[in-house]
């Protein structure tokens, strides 16, 4: 059995090779992104000069603790390179489901503002169809969330309010709720994304369609870089 953390670390360490001095970076959220932050901090310690916009308070705290200079959209509207993990990566298209870690809104804002968006995963995340290993997270306003959940259900999914281990409603960094929506296999991610975001009360959803520049995948056989259209390099 492969050690998933070792694979995540291997993908993260490969991603650091794409970072150049002077870049404005987007820092993702989650366990794989945390390995990237760690690896980046080591390079910063050796003199690499970058500035980073984090996608969550958790990542901001880690980056700050490790000495990575942080910025916000107040100073930089354009990000050179964002690096983030994912919950599912669809082979060939490289479309994603993100947000099972709860940071999808900021992650999507950062991805949308980035010239390049590189995704880092272990091979467990690769799927033939999105939606097959778990729910699609949808961030919604607290007010009227029950009505928003009913509207989502009419799209043929089962929405469930995310809760913390202690049973409280999970709150995003933006103070919103998350409805984890079980769609099963998502045949048309573009249309699903459009229909979800057309519902009043939805803030954003975890489908990232056509956003990945490349996906770095670590498996027991080594690290591969996938680009859309199915090109692979090592
Ligand atoms: C957080 C995310 C994460 O990137 C995703 O959940 C993957 O996390 P991990 O690297 O821990 O498997 O989208 O909102």
Image: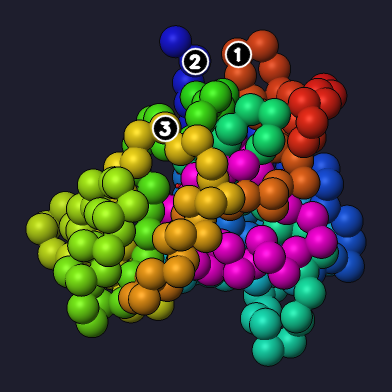
- Return the disc, 3 or 2, that comes first in the chain's sequence: 2
Mark 1 secondary-structure assignment? loop
Give the extent of the magenta segment: 95-122
Q: Which residue is mark 1?
A: 220
Using the numbered discs, state the Cα–Cα distance from disc 2 to disc 1 in whole angstroms. Answer: 6 Å
Name the side, left or right, on which 225 lies relative to 195: right
Using the numbered discs, state the Cα–Cα distance from disc 3 to disc 1 in whole angstroms. Answer: 27 Å
Quadrant placement of the C terminus? top right
Whether the residue under disc 2 has CB within 8 Å of ligand 1? no
Q: Which residue is mark 2?
A: 2
Q: Residues within 10 Å of mark 1 (few under 14, many from 20)?
A: few
| Residue that sits furthest to the left in the current view | 167
| Residue that sits furthest to the front in the current view | 154
Image coordinates for residue 151, horizontal then vertical, percent: 27, 63
Check whether the beta carbons of the residues at disc 2 and disc 1 lie within 8 A of each other. yes
Q: Residues within 10 Å of mark 3 (few under 14, many from 20)?
A: some
Nearer to me, 14 or 108: 108
Image coordinates for residue 91, horizontal then vertical, percent: 63, 27
- The correct choice, above or below, for 7 with respect to 117 in the image is above
Q: Which residue is mark 3?
A: 185
């Amino acid at each position: 059995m492969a050690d998933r953390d070792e694979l995540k670390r291997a993908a993260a360490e490969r991603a650091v090779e794409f970072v150049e001095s002077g870049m404005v970076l987007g820092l993702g959220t989650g366990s794989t992104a945390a390995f990237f932050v760690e690896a980046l901090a080591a390079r910063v310690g050796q003199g690499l000069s970058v500035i980073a916009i984090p996608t969550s308070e958790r990542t901001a705290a880690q980056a700050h603790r490790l000495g990575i200079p942080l910025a916000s959209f107040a100073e930089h509207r354009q990000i050179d390179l964002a690096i983030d993990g994912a919950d599912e990566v669809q082979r060939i298209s490289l479309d994603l489901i993100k947000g099972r870690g709860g940071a999808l809104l900021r992650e999507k804002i950062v991805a949308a503002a980035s010239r390049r968006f590189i995704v880092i995963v272990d091979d467990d995340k690769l799927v033939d169809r999105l939606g097959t290993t778990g729910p699609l997270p949808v961030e919604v306003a607290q007010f009227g969330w029950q009505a928003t959940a009913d509207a989502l259900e009419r799209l043929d999914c089962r929405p469930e309010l995310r809760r913390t281990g202690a049973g409280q409603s999970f709150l995003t960094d933006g103070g919103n709720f998350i409805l984890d929506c079980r769609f099963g296999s998502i045949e048309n991610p573009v249309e699903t994304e459009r229909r979800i975001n057309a519902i009043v009360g939805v803030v954003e959803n975890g489908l990232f369609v056509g956003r990945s520049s490349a996906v770095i995948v670590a498996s027991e056989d080594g690290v591969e870089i996938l680009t859309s259209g199915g090109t692979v390099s090592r």
